[in-house]
Image (cartoon, grey):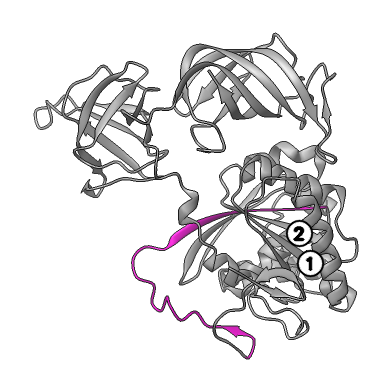
């Protein structure tokens, strides 16, 4: 997947690159349905996240003419002196006035190769909870680094959060290369420093790309301003990064969201269990066990809006019919008999705190795990993490807003959990304040019993 240039890892050059354009030979036209890649962007204030997303939308011709005209008018009114593509994503008035990203903005675009959903997440530390929310479902994270300033504390924090969330692929986009005269030495100095930091984290795949989002260098097309860079432009990498193995197709996990019983003359004997596949592949005839009850049956059929399917896999939403009538309700889970998750009431987890009121030992919350809800008490705060240095503060008495730590929880009802490293869906949960009904914490399971 990577080639070596001056001893450093960079993405492979496309097989066919001519006159700055990328030609994709193996998908013309693309057969079957396009894959969906969820992307989260992160970076320090003014690193150019919103501009980069705007450039991707603009150069991939994913912007309506009236949108482009509005951006041009706003850019002129602000006196920017250029087409400010960041306005396509900085939608809140406060964001435009302050020049920072506050909320998570989602943007969609498509190429012949793939569909994309981009979450433009805030970079500032005070919006860590927003970043975690936007990145929680991403398969790839783009961390921007300002070439003039190099690797900052926020850059290291963003990489740590990406590793904490087990995002499989990380792209470090070294932006504003035009402001450092497209310097090769500057790019590789940042690459070396970031590689050293990444070695301390669980980042299985990291790629470095030098870009200028403002001018479009190495964003959609190859930049001839950087002939020393032998790799692919950003969009080519996004189109070709392999994401199919990232899904857990080995462990069958089907949380039941709804029991469907129409109870009418046409379907008087119909009983189906609706939900979204969280792991593995479901097929008719396969033996499954309903947890936590433990009774078994076989899959009779898999129904969708389009009719019956011969298989279902993450993240399809389907209705499963079984050969036997079992006592199954919302919050139960269908799994394989010989490959079950842990049925646990005690959890140890990494927790990102999102509440205005701090978390402290002894506090009680509602816990929501997949489709199951229970009550939880915080037994212990083991430590708080300094996300800039990775130091563990074991003397911490509480977790404040936007802080991350390791906690132990007890639940009032059993939860069917996997380790987060094994399954990001069945290994995660949220905590809800019982009085306000606000989501106050997002957790990732590291052990369960």
Q: What residue is shown at x 62% (from left), y 29% (from top)?
A: 443
Q: How many marks?
A: 2
User: Residue 198 has which mark?
Assistant: none
Task: Please say if the residues under marks 2 and 1 sit with CB atoms less than 8 Å apart.
Answer: yes
Q: What residue is shown at x 50% (from left), y 30% (from top)?
A: 418
Task: Say whether residue 304 is left or right of residue 138.
Answer: left
User: Residue 175 has which mark?
Assistant: 1
Q: Nearer the viewer, residue 103 or 22?
A: 22
Please rate how many residues cluster around mark 2, counting C-alpha atoms within 10 Å: few if below 14, some from 14 to 19, many from 20.
many
Residue 438 seen in this snapshot: no
**Earlier along the polypeptide chain: callout 2 or callout 1?**
2
Q: Nearer the viewer, residue 176 or 278?
A: 278
Q: Is residue 21 magenta?
A: yes
Q: Residue furthest left?
A: 265
Q: Secondary structure at mark 1?
A: strand
**Magenta stretch bounds:** 19-44
Taking 202 as reference, is 151 above or below it?
A: below
Task: Say whether residue 384 is left or right of residue 305.
Answer: right
Q: Quadrant of the N terminus?
A: bottom right
Q: What residue is shown at x 75% (from left), y 69% (from top)?
A: 8
Percent from the top left, x then y, of residue 67?
62, 66
Give me the C-alpha separation between circle 2 and circle 1: 6 Å
Residue 370 seen in this snapshot: yes
Taking 225 as reference, is 239 above or below it?
A: above
Q: Quadrant of residue 380?
A: top right
Please rate how many residues cluster around mark 1, counting C-alpha atoms within 10 Å: few if below 14, some from 14 to 19, many from 20.
many
User: Residue 144 has which mark?
Assistant: 2
Q: What residue is shown at x 45% (from left), y 55% (from top)?
A: 244
Percent from the top left, x then y, of residue 369?
50, 26
Q: Is residue 379 magenta?
A: no
């Amino acid at each position: 997947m990577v080639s070596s240039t001056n001893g450093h890892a960079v993405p492979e050059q496309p097989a066919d690159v001519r006159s700055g354009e990328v030609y994709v030979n193996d998908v013309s036209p693309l057969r079957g349905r396009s894959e969906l890649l969820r992307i989260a962007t992160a970076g320090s204030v003014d690193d150019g996240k919103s501009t980069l997303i705007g450039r991707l939308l603009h150069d991939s011709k994913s912007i309506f003419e009236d949108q482009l005209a509005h951006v041009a008018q706003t850019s002129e009114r602000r006196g920017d002196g250029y087409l400010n593509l960041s306005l396509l994503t900085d939608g809140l008035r406060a964001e435009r006035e302050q020049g920072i990203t506050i909320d998570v903005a989602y943007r969609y675009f498509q190429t012949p190769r793939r569909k994309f959903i981009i979450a433009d997440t805030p970079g500032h530390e005070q919006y860590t909870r927003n970043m975690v929310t936007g990145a929680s479902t991403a398969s790839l994270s783009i961390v921007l680094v300002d070439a003039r300033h190099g690797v900052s504390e926020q850059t290291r924090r963003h990489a740590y959060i990406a590793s904490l969330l087990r995002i499989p692929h990380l792209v470090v986009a070294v932006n504003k290369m035009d402001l450092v005269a497209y310097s090769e030495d500057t790019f590789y100095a940042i690459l070396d420093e970031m590689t050293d930091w990444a070695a301390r984290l669980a980042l299985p795949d990291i790629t470095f790309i030098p870009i200028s989002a403002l001018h479009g260098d190495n964003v959609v097309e190859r930049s001839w301003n950087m002939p020393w860079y032998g790799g692919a432009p950003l969009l080519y990498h996004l189109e070709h990064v392999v994401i199919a193995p990232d899904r857990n197709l080995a462990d069958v996990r089907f949380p039941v969201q709804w029991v469907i019983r129409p109870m009418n003359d046409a379907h008087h004997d119909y009983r189906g269990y609706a939900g979204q596949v969280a792991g593995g592949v479901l097929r008719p005839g396969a033996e499954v066990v309903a947890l936590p009850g433990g009774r078994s049956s076989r899959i009779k059929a898999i129904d969708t809006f389009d009719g019956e399917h011969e298989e279902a896999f993450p993240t399809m939403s389907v209705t499963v019919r079984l050969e036997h009538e079992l006592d199954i309700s919302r919050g139960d889970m269908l799994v394989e008999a010989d490959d079950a998750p842990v049925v646990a009431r005690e959890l140890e987890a990494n927790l990102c705190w999102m509440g205005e009121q701090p978390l402290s030992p002894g506090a009680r919350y509602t816990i929501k795990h997949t489709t199951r809800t229970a009550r939880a008490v915080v037994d212990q705060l083991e430590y708080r993490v300094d996300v800039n240095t990775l130091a563990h503060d074991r003397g911490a008495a509480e977790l404040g807003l936007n802080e991350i730590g390791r906690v132990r929880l007890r639940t009032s009802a059993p939860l069917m959990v996997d380790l987060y490293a094994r399954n990001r869906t069945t290994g995660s949960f949220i905590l809800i304040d019982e009085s306000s009904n606000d989501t106050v914490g997002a957790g990732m399971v590291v052990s369960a019993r």
